[in-house]
């Protein structure tokens, strides 16, 4: 199975400051169709996960443009340009290139 | 809009089975798959398996093989997930999520169903 390793585990951030989460996969996530199926999810307390980013860098509809995704092959990053109070929660990366689908362990974003 | 509505919370004894439903609306049901993901209390997300909503083809996580089944009912746009021989460590919130037919890129998620396994 592809192991997804996220860091850091916990990320205290000052409001208005940037935040960055790393996700590394144990093998390349490049698929035979030319796409890379790396997704990012946000889970606010008590809610279902919500997809923010798909195929590395594509923002879902309604996702603020302060969220951005980048990376390739085995190394990926989610950035929040200026953290707002509503961004508190746990963020997960997930790879969809190889079966079984696998998630990173999560990064908890909190306000300092 | 796309909606996935799941059945309500369940309490089961060890060794029993549970069946959770996921009713889809707002899109062409048979053009997508459904993945099931669970989350134990205070833990991360664990993918359980996937079903093609049209053909019924499935792909299950190795650790659940033999205990999990997923079926599709195209007449009601509903997918069911059954987990058998329940143990205390199966206590979790179970989510269904719309997925693609080939690669995994879950987009819309259900509200979750809490399954508690306790004697």
Image (cartoon, coloured by chain):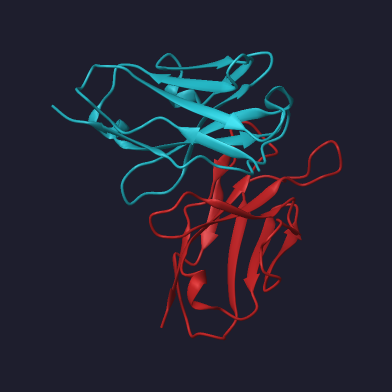
Instruction: Please identify the quarter of the rendering in which residue B76 is found.
Output: top right
Q: Is residue B88 above or below residue A15?
A: above
The chain whose colour is red is A
Q: Position of residue A56 (x, y in %)?
A: 73, 55
Instruction: Please identify the quarter of the rendering in which residue B89 is found.
Output: top left
Q: Which quadrant: the N terminus of chain B?
A: top right
Task: Specify whether residue B66 is in view.
Answer: yes
Q: Is residue A81 above or below residue B15?
A: below
Compare residues B88 and A44 and report the one nearer the observer: A44
The chain whose colour is cyan is B
Residue displayed at 46% across by 22% down: B81
Q: Is residue B94 above or below residue A68?
A: above
Q: Is residue B91 above or below residue A68?
A: above
Total of numbered circles in the picture?
0
Residue displayed at 61% across by 81% down: A82
Compare residues A4 and B21 and report the one nearer the observer: B21
Q: Position of residue B39 (x, y in %)?
A: 40, 42
Task: Specify whether residue A1 is in view.
Answer: no
Return the residue found at the far left. Answer: B119
Compare residues B23 and B57 and report the one nearer the observer: B23
Judge left or right: residue B62 versus residue B73: left
Judge left or right: residue B1 versus residue B38: right
Q: Which quadrant: the C terminus of chain B?
A: top left
Residue displayed at 66% across by 40% down: A96
Judge left or right: residue B18 versus residue B103: left
Q: Position of residue B17 (x, y in %)?
A: 31, 17
Q: Position of residue A35 (x, y in %)?
A: 82, 45
Instruction: Please identify the quarter of the rendering in which residue A71 is found.
Output: bottom right
């Amino acid at each position: 199975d592809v192991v997804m390793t996220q860091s850091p585990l916990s990320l205290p951030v000052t409001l208005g400051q940037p935040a960055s989460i790393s996700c590394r996969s144990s093998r390349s996530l490049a698929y035979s169709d030319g796409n890379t199926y790396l997704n990012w999810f946000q889970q606010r307390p008590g809610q279902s996960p919500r997809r923010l980013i798909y195929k590395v860098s594509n923002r879902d509809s309604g996702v603020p443009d302060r969220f951005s995704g980048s990376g390739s092959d085995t190394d990926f990053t989610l950035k929040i340009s200026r953290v707002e109070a509503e961004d508190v929660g746990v963020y997960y990366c997930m790879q969809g290139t190889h079966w079984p689908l696998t998630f990173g362990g999560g990064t908890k974003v909190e306000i300092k | 809009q796309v909606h996935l509505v799941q059945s309500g919370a369940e309490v089961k004894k060890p060794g029993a089975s549970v069946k959770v439903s996921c009713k889809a609306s707002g899109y062409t049901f048979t053009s997508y798959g459904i993945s099931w993901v669970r989350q134990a209390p205070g833990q991360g997300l664990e993918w359980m398996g996937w079903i093609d909503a049209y053909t019924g083809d499935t792909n299950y996580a190795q650790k659940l093989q033999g205990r999990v089944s997923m079926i599709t009912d195209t007449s009601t746009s509903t997918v069911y997930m059954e987990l058998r021989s329940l143990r205390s460590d199966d206590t979790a919130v179970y989510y269904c999520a719309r997925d693609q037919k080939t690669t995994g890129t879950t987009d819309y998620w259900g509200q979750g169903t809490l399954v508690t396994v306790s004697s």
